[in-house]
């Protein structure tokens, strides 16, 4: 059958009977578009499956953890008026696996993936049963039976190039609404794999791209992407449309959007993604598209990182020599410290890192060939929008706002894509800066 949309429901959207009823209504409304449904595990279950694996390995009390997981699923089923034994086969597998790990005191990535797979395998059964209950012809489907074949990198598997054709072939022979396990795949020799934490969005993008659907819907518990964090800025509002490039910039700030890697299949296939709120389905959410229409351009969002530190490196003798930046980057890489923003001048380099990063060994290395200072108590503000590329007035407004507030930018960086202007400011002024910029960029007439 030909699917018109993929609808992916995250952990909170399948986290209770009440949530699953909403899913039923949302899928029902979309029935004319022949939805392909992808589900996450019930909220919190994947974490518990990892905890269970740890406990089994350490010889701890696995029985109680298993009981909790079982009780959670059985309660949802009972609340939905469905038979609680629906999940029994997967609970039996869970206990067998935990027993095996405890017995051998060994938990390979392959075993852990199999254990982690149980969350989605159970939630898909529950959601499909509920959809059938409300009169939809739905059936549960494990990702591999929907054609998703991956490599054997357990814990971070990637689809094989042959997967797309298999996904299409599986769809051809099918009728009704499949409710497919997100996050999972299977490698050629038959073992279950996972795509990495949060991988259900990736699953949705993989299936959506293979099936050339019109839209991939990501149903979650927020209204979409906001112009600023609503906890910080009371007047923050929903952003109706973002480009993939803008969404990728925002993801860097940890904004509750899609991770760029998970969007890749959709980006390549130019399939729009829409982020929607399961609790407010009437809201239109945020659409993420390959290319913006002229009327859709503008400044989209202000994102922040509240706790960062800057490392300033000055090495006048090294300047104009080969490999200077490489030596700096190397010091960070060697000690596994991730660098966020870099700004360089002829005689210095400034780099920002998360405030929690362990900087001492990096500084020690850098000090062997440069003068290093570390400035703490900083924050990063990112203004995101493709409009920054050519909107001269916007840059001026941003810096004018800082000047009005009496805030000096410690550092500013305008990435190569020019979709994001990142400014480093003193942490104690972060709130003023975000409020001021939000007012100037989103509320000013
Ligand atoms: N259940 C998996 C996780 O929690 C995948 C997902 O929710 O996207 O990581
Ligand atoms: Mg989850």
Image (spheres, rainbow, N blue to C red):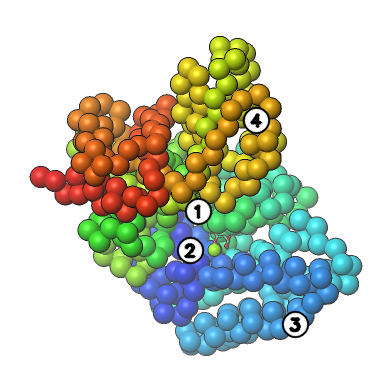
Residue 201 bears which disc, if any?
A: 1
Number of the front mark, 4 or 3: 4
Residue 328 in percent (x, y) is at 61, 28
| Callouts 2 and 1 close, C-beta under 8 Å | yes
Label whose residue precedes the other's in the sequence (2 or 4): 2
Residue 367 bears which disc, if any?
A: 4
Mark 2 and ligand 1: say if the CB distance to the nearest ligand atom is below 8 Å.
yes
Residue 392 bears which disc, if any?
A: none
In this picture, is 79 found above or below 188? below
| Callouts 2 and 3 close, C-beta under 8 Å | no
Residue at image position (61%, 25%) is: 370
Which residue position holds label 2?
10
Residue at image position (47%, 24%) is: 344
Label whose residue precedes the other's in the sequence (4 or 3): 3
SS assignment at label 3? helix
| Whole-number angstrom distance, CA of label 2 to CA of label 1 | 8 Å
Q: Quadrant of the C terminus?
A: top left
Which residue position holds label 3?
63
Q: Residues within 10 Å of mark 2 (few under 14, many from 20)?
A: many
Q: Residue furthest right?
A: 104
In this picture, is 63 found above or below 276? below
SS assignment at label 1? helix
Label whose residue precedes the other's in the sequence (2 or 1): 2
| Whole-number angstrom distance, CA of label 1 to CA of label 3 | 31 Å
Residue at image position (42%, 75%) is: 19
Label whose residue precedes the other's in the sequence (1 or 3): 3
Q: Residues within 10 Å of mark 4 (few under 14, many from 20)?
A: some
């Amino acid at each position: 059958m030909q699917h018109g949309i993929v609808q992916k429901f995250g952990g909170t959207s399948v986290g209770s009977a009440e949530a699953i009823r909403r899913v039923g209504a949302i899928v029902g409304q979309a029935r004319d578009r022949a939805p392909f449904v992808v589900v996450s595990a019930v909220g919190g279950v994947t974490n518990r499956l990892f905890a269970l694996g740890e406990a089994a390995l350490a010889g701890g009390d696995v029985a109680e953890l298993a009981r909790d997981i079982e009780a959670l699923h059985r309660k949802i089923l009972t609340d939905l008026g469905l038979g609680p034994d629906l999940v029994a086969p997967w609970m039996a597998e869970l206990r067998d696996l935990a027993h095996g790990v405890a017995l051998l005191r060994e938990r390979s990535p392959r075993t852990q993936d199999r254990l982690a797979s149980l969350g989605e395998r159970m939630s898909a059964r529950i959601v499909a049963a509920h959809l059938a209950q409300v009169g939809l012809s739905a059936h549960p489907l494990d990702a591999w039976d929907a054609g998703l074949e991956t490599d054997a990198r357990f814990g971070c598997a990637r689809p094989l190039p042959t997967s797309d054709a298999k996904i299409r072939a599986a769809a051809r022979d099918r009728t009704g609404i499949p409710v497919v396990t997100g996050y999972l795949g299977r490698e050629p020799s038959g073992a279950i794999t996972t795509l990495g934490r949060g991988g259900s969005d990736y699953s949705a993008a993989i299936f959506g791209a293979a099936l050339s659907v019109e839209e991939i819907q990501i149903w979650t518990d927020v209204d979409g992407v906001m112009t600023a964090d609503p906890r910080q800025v009371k007047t923050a509002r929903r952003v109706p449309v973002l480009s993939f490039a803008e969404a990728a910039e925002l993801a860097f700030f940890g904004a509750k959007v899609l991770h760029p890697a998970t969007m890749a299949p959709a980006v390549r296939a130019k399939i729009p993604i829409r982020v929607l709120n399961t609790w407010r389905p009437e809201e239109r959410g945020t659409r993420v598209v390959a290319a913006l229409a002229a009327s859709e351009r503008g400044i989209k969002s202000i994102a922040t990182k509240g706790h960062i530190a800057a490392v300033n490196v000055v090495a006048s003798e090294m300047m104009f020599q080969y490999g200077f930046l490489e030596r700096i980057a190397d010091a960070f890489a060697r000690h596994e410290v991730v660098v966020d923003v870099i700004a360089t001048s002829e005689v210095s380099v400034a780099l920002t890192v998360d405030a929690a990063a362990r900087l001492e060994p990096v500084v020690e290395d850098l000090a062997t060939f440069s003068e290093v200072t570390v400035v703490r108590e900083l924050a990063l503000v990112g203004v995101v929008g493709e409009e920054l590329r050519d909107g001269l007035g916007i840059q001026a407004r941003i810096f004018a706002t800082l000047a009005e507030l009496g805030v000096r930018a410690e550092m500013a960086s305008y990435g190569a894509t020019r979709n994001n202007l990142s400014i480093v400011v003193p942490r104690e002024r972060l709130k003023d800066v975000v409020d001021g910029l939000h007012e100037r960029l989103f509320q000013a007439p």
